[in-house]
Image (tube, helix red, strand yellow):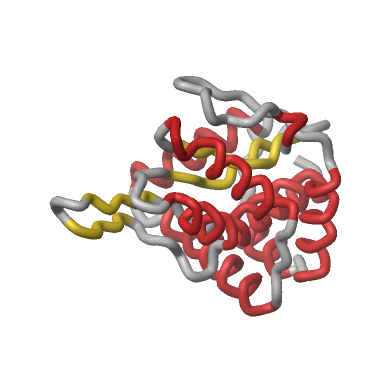
Amino acid sequence: MSWSSLYSNVFWALVNSCISTSHFFHNISPSVGASTKRGASAGSQLIQAVSGVLGDAAGAVSALNLNYTDAGLFGFVAAAPAASAGKVVSAAVSALRSVKVDDAALARAKAQLKTDLLMAEESTGGLLEELSLQALLNKGNVIAVADLITAIGQISAADVNAAASKVASGKLAMAAIGNLSSTPYVDEL
């Protein structure tokens, strides 16, 4: 894998981490009270935007990042009841179009991504899975974690904000399943 390709993959993984730090599930039941599992992360703009429109409904959202050698797909995956789906999709699109990352958010995202890389090597199973996946996807080449960490360190907040701006001005694509009665058409976003 070339350095530019390695940098590109690490870069988009870092952008993903800046926008969405974790999955989010929210549920408030009148009979049970509030319950939040893996709550709305204070550092995640995507999760904050979606949690603000859910009200008492359950829902989940996470950023999506798929890299290929010549293209990629960056966006989000969301799940919500039919009545809330339109609001959730609109809020998530709005959040992706208005992302601004400061140095503190970038530092947190870098630390999280580095931790994820290092933790993958903590168990034999995790290490074997990572090595085999890299070998499969990189034509037999395995990239040292130290090289990945070096690449992470070279990315600036200005780089992330420029990429976020490019994503914001890009053409949208959407796929949806289930009861779509309140889900907007992509041209309405």
- Residue lying at the far left of the rendered structure: 31
Q: Residue placed at 57% from the left, 55% from the top?
A: 46
Q: Residue at position x 27%, y 53% from top?
A: 28
Residue 105 percent across, percent down from the top left: 62, 72
Up-down relation of residue 40 to residue 170 (above or below): below
Residue 89 percent coordinates (x, y): 58, 40
As drawn, the residue found furthest toward the top would be 178
Q: Is residue 142 left or right of residue 8?
A: left
Q: Is residue 172 above or below residue 58?
A: above
What percent of the width, then of the height, locates residue 60?
A: 43, 44
Quadrant where the N terminus lies? top right
The x, y position of residue 83, in whole percent, is 44, 35
| Residue that appears at 61% across and 24% down | 175
In which quadrant of the rendered view does residue 155 lie?
bottom right
Does the rendering let one see residue 137? yes
Check the image and report above or below for 57 versus 37.
above
Res. 117 in view:
no
Q: Is residue 80 left or right of residue 140?
A: left
Q: Nearer the viewer, residue 175 or 81?
A: 81
* Count of picture labels: 0
Most foreground residue, 184 or 72: 184
Q: Could you tell me which quadrant the C terminus lies in?
A: top right
In this view, the residue in front, 88 or 169, is 88
Q: Residue at x 63, y 79 (%)?
A: 104
Q: Quadrant of residue 136?
A: top right
